[in-house]
Amino acid sequence: QLMEKAEGRNQTSIVEFILLGFGNGPELQPLLFLLFLVIYIVTVAGNMLFVALVVADQHLHTPMYFFLGNLSCLEICYTSTTLPRLLASLLTGDRTISVQGCLVQLYFFGVTSNTENLLLTAMSYDRYLAICHPLRYTVLMTGRVCCLLVAGGWISSLLSSTIVQIYLWQFTFCDSKEIDHFFCDFSPILKLSCSDTQTLELVTFILAVIGTFLPFLLTLTSYICIIINVLRNPSNTGRKKAFSTCSSHLIVLAILYVTVLTVYVVPIPDSHKVLQKIFSVFYTVLTPIINPLIYSLRNKEVKESLSKAILKLAAYRNR
C-alpha cells in the first residue's frame, strides 16, 4: 500500500505547507480580515468578562459556574490556536507555514478541542446530579471532584494528542504543499504524507472512540436521564426550572456535535470543500463566541452579576 501511495509522487521532502484558506479573491481578503478580527476580539473579551464575573461574584462560586469559567478560559485558548494565524495570512497574504509550525498548531488544536469535549461531558454529569440527585448533589459534586474532572480532561487530551504527534513528527511530506483549509487539520495533513499512515489511522480511530464517542454517549445518557426525571415532575414550575438550567448547555452541545460530525464523519466530496470549511468555521470560530452569549443571555444569575458589576464600576467612576 505504501508503494501505491508513493508511486508517481515527487519524493522530494517538503519543509513548508501553503494554507489555501478561503480562496484568492483579493477583494474578499480585507473583508474576511475585519470579520475574523471582530469575532476574535469579541470572543476573547466576552470569555474574559465571563471569567472575571465568576471569580469576582461569590454567588457564582458553585460547581456549574466553576465549569463554565473553565470553559471560557478554554475557549480563549481554543480560538487562539487557529484565528491569529488566519488573521496574519489575510493581512499579509503570506499563506505559507512550516511543517513544524503546522504540526504544533495541530497539536494545540487537538488538545483544546478534546478538552472542550470532555469538559462539556463533565458539565452534563454536573447537571445530571443537580437535577436527578439534588439531595446528594453537594456531597457528590465537591470542589475536589470538580478540579479532578477538569484536570482529567486536560491530562487525557494532552496524552492522546502527544501520541498522535509522536507518529506525525516521524512522517515525511512530499509532492504537494497545498492544504485546502484555513488551519492545519489532521485529515488534510495526512493526505500529504508519503509515509505509511495505516498505524496512525488505527491509533487515531481508537483515541477518537475513547475521547470523543464515549464522552458523547455519556452526555447523551445524562440528558436522557434528565429529561425522564423532569417529565416525571408533577410541578410545571419545577419542570421549567430544570429545563432552564440545562437548555443553554443543550444548545451549545447541539451546535458543536452537529458541526463536528458533519465535518469528520459525513463524507463530503472534494467538489464541496467550501461547505466543509464553513462547517469548520462554526465549531472553531463561532462556538467560542456563542458560548458566553448563550450562558449570559439565558442565565438570570449571570445577568444580575453583570448588572452589579456595571453599577459598581459606574459608582467608582462617579467618585
Image: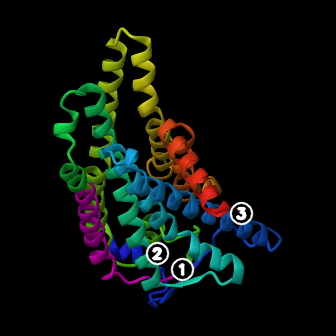
Q: Nearer the viewer, residue 170 or 6?
A: 170
What residue appears at the point 35 percent right and 76 percent down from the top-left corner? 3
What residue appears at the point 24 percent right and 60 percent down from the top-left corner? 151
Q: Quadrant of the N terminus?
A: bottom left
The three-letter code of the residue at mark 2 reads Leu
The three-letter code of the residue at mark 3 reads Leu
Q: Nearer the viewer, mark 3 or mark 2?
A: 3
User: In the picture shown, does residue 182 fall above or below 104?
Assistant: above
Q: Would you say 47 lies left or right of 186 here?
A: right
Numbered badge on residue 192: 2
Numbered badge on residue 239: none
Crowd class of label 2 (few under 14; some 14 to 19; many from 20; radius 10 Å): some
Tell me where residue 237 appears, x and y as whole percent.
44, 16
Numbered badge on residue 35: 3
User: In the displayed image of the protein, which residue is found farthest to the top?
Assistant: 234
Numbered badge on residue 176: 1
Q: Which corner quadrant of the image does residue 296 belong to?
A: top right
Tell me where residue 35 appears, x and y as whole percent.
71, 63
Secondary element type, mark 3: helix
Magenta-colored span: 150-176
Dominant SS of magenta comes to helix
User: In the picture shown, does residue 123 fall above or below 37?
Assistant: above
Q: How many marks?
A: 3
User: In the picture shown, does residue 192 fall above or below 237?
Assistant: below
Looking at the picture, the colour scheme in use is rainbow
User: Earlier along the polypeptide chain: callout 2 or callout 1?
Assistant: 1
The three-letter code of the residue at mark 1 reads Ser
